[in-house]
Image (cartoon, rainbow, N blue to C red):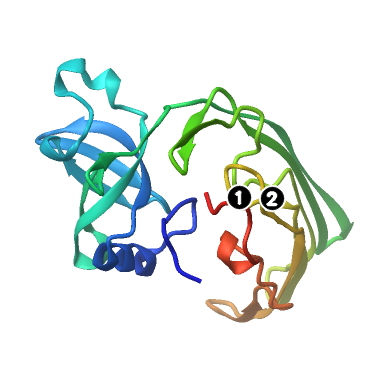
Amino acid sequence: LFTTRVTGGVAGSTQLEDASSSGIPVDGVVVKEIKGGFEVRLAGGARAFCPHSQMDLPRSGGQEERIGKHASFRITMYGEKGRNIVVSQNVGGTPSLENAGEERLRGVDLETRFRVLPNLNWLVGYGYHDARFGDYVTEFGGVPTQLEGNRVEMSAKHLASTGLSYSSGSGWLGHVGANYVGSRFLNKRNTALAPDYMTWDAGIAYRFQEYEVRLDGWNLNDARPPAAVRERGRARDSP
């Protein structure tokens, strides 16, 4: 499988460096205008700089024409291990612009704690997040597509956690917990659904008067949920 575009919230430094050397487009959003150009937030959260001369939107339109716009960028310089990134919006000589669009989030988060014994607590948490696109238009294969009503990619509706925690002023301490992440779509068109999964955590420690020694383990069941379409097979489109 070959990567043709870096999208979503899973792009790390390795993916961005590869995109720089291979010329693969990277999704980003224009955050604000700064001296000489614009600050751009790339997929994965990395910050980049796009000079005015490399922004395909007309400069006469005012910054409201640019701020919040989604587009595909080409990384023209990748330095200092990702701390210095320069991009161009001109991908293959053709602008690739998205509607600034709308995203809406509705949900609730609940958390409670029960004291089972004087030093033993039971924690329970649940979150319901319904994140969907509002009026949001982007292009797939050169065809404008309305995404209104689709769920935002990588956003699970249901999140839950529970665990037991034992603590005291000194001596033995410990915790064990489980975390649940519901199913979520890996792309904007909602054609690739990743299943729900759980992870288990545990830890033990001994607290002395001035310090403590501890051993903690996270994701003990080694759950490996897919974070991109290519990790679970082909879908109708990758974005």
Query: Residue 173 location in percent, x, y?
Result: 72, 74
Which corner quadrant of the image does residue 109 belong to? top right
The kind of secondary structure element at disc 1 is loop
Q: Nearer the viewer, residue 1 or 119?
A: 1
Residue highlighted by disc 1:
154
Neighbor class of circle 1 (other Cα within 10 Å; few <14, some 14-19, many 20+) is many
Give yes or no for contact between labels 2 and 1 (Cβ–Cβ under 8 Å): yes
Q: Secondary structure at mark 2?
A: strand
Q: In the image, what residue occupies the spot 56% across and 60% down?
A: 228
Answer few, some or many: residues within 10 Å of disc 2's Cα (few below 14, many 20 plus, some between 14 and 19).
many
Looking at the picture, tell me which residue is in the foreground, 18 or 140.
Answer: 140
Tell me if residue 137 comes above or below residue 159 in the rendering: above
Q: Is residue 179 visible?
A: no
Q: State left or right for residue 212 relative to residue 181.
A: left
Looking at this view, is 123 or 118 the one in front? 123
Q: Residue at x 69, y 77 (%)?
A: 222
Separation (CA) of disc 2 from disc 1:
6 Å
The disc, 2 or 1, on the residue closer to the chain's N-terminal end is 1
Left or right: 154 as drawn, with respect to 41:
right
Residue farthest along the front direction in this orientation: 142
The three-letter code of the residue at mark 1 reads Met
Compared with 171, 167 (above or below) is above
Query: Which residue is denoted by mark 2 in the rendering?
Result: 184
Q: Position of residue 23 (x, y in %)?
A: 27, 61
> Going by the image, does 114 lie left or right of 110?
right
Q: Residue at x 69, y 50 (%)?
A: 184
Instruction: Decide if residue 21 is in sight here.
Output: yes
Residue flagged by tag 2: what amino acid is it?
Answer: Arg
